[in-house]
């Protein structure tokens, strides 16, 4: 196994996040469609290929073929019902944090967030649903469908394979703090959503630790998909009402 030192870890994390964030920031000034839709498209053609490409490249070196094997090192089999149950328990914890920690963090960072958004086109504010509603019904339908596909399946599955699978298993320091470190780095790598880092850390660190101890990334993957599904459903309800 080719181990990853801290310098390479930071490089692997920052490259896809930077490419996505910069392309979104630049193209967002000329965006004729909802910014959320454009972001999902950019994520599909930048973030996903880069992260999967790193995994495929590592698998080629370690296993002799392009595959996901390097992200699925020493994985233990767990019954599906148990995976779903554990994921749901952490999803419930995330729900509690979303009504306690998240509002407080949003309140404290609101002035900074608003000052930044005031310098950008209105579409960069994903919470401004009234602006999103100004687009035609077909555009909104496409936005909801693609947002659902990217945010519930494509994005979280790729990120879990990359962070909880490849990076966690290949980091050269393997101890009980490894999954916590990777979870913190995962939270911070969301350059495009920089105002919920504390909430993300508290939400993802525990499930990342359990997935690491049980040697099954499908626990965190299922949890990640659940969380994103909740946000997508909330968005669709708000847009379509």
Image: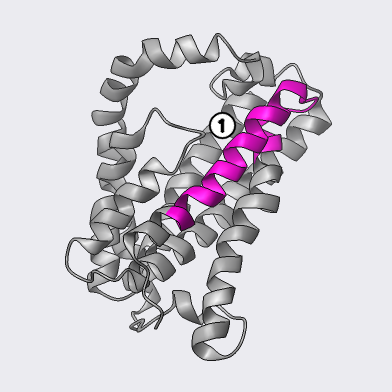
Judge whether residue 185 is colored magenta: no
| Main secondary structure found in the magenta portion | helix
Q: Where does residue 127 sit, x and y in percent of width and height?
A: 53, 21
> Percent from the top left, x then y, of residue 87?
33, 59
**Is residue 13 or residue 147 the one in the foreground?**
13
- In the displayed structure, 53 sits above or below 114; it is below
On the picture, is 103 further left or further right than 225? left
Q: Position of residue 17 (x, y in %)?
A: 53, 45
Q: Which residue is painted at 69% across and 26% down in the image? A: 28
Report which quarter residue 64 is drawn in: bottom right
Question: Where does label 1 land, which residue?
Answer: 235
Residue 89, can we see it? Answer: no
| Picture layout, residue 36 above or below residue 152 | above
- Residue 168 in sight in this render: yes
Q: Specify the quadrant that holds the C terminus.
A: top right
The residue located at (31%, 71%) in the rendering is: 82
Q: Nearer the viewer, residue 80 or 174?
A: 174
Residue interval drawn in magenta = 11-39
Residue 173 as seen in the image, left or right of residue 220: left
Image quadrant where residue 52 sits: bottom right
Is residue 12 magenta-colored? yes
Foreground of the two, 166 or 60? 60
């Amino acid at each position: 196994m080719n181990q990853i030192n801290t310098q390479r870890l930071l490089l692997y994390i920052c490259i896809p996040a930077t490419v996505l964030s910069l392309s979104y920031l630049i193209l967002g000034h000329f965006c004729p469609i909802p910014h959320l839709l454009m972001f999902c498209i950019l994520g599909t053609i930048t973030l996903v290929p880069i992260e999967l490409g790193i995994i495929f490249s590592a698998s080629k070196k370690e296993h002799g073929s392009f595959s996901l094997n390097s992200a699925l090192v020493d994985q233990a089999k767990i019954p599906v019902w148990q995976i779903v149950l554990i994921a749901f328990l952490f999803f419930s914890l995330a729900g509690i944090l979303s009504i306690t920690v998240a509002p407080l963090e949003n309140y404290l960072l609101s002035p900074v967030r608003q000052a930044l958004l005031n310098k950008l086109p209105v579409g960069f504010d994903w919470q401004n649903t009234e602006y999103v509603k100004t687009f035609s019904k077909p555009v909104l339908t496409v936005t909801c469908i693609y947002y659902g596909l990217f945010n519930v399946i494509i994005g979280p599955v790729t990120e879990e394979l990359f962070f909880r699978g490849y990076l966690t298993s290949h980091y050269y320091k393997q101890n009980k703090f490894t999954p916590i470190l990777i979870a913190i780095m995962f939270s911070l790598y969301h350059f495009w959503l920089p105002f919920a880092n504390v909430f993300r850390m508290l939400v993802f660190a525990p499930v990342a630790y359990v997935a690491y101890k049980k040697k099954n990334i499908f626990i965190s993957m299922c949890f990640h998909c659940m969380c994103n599904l909740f946000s997508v459903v909330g968005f669709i309800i708000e847009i379509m009402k």
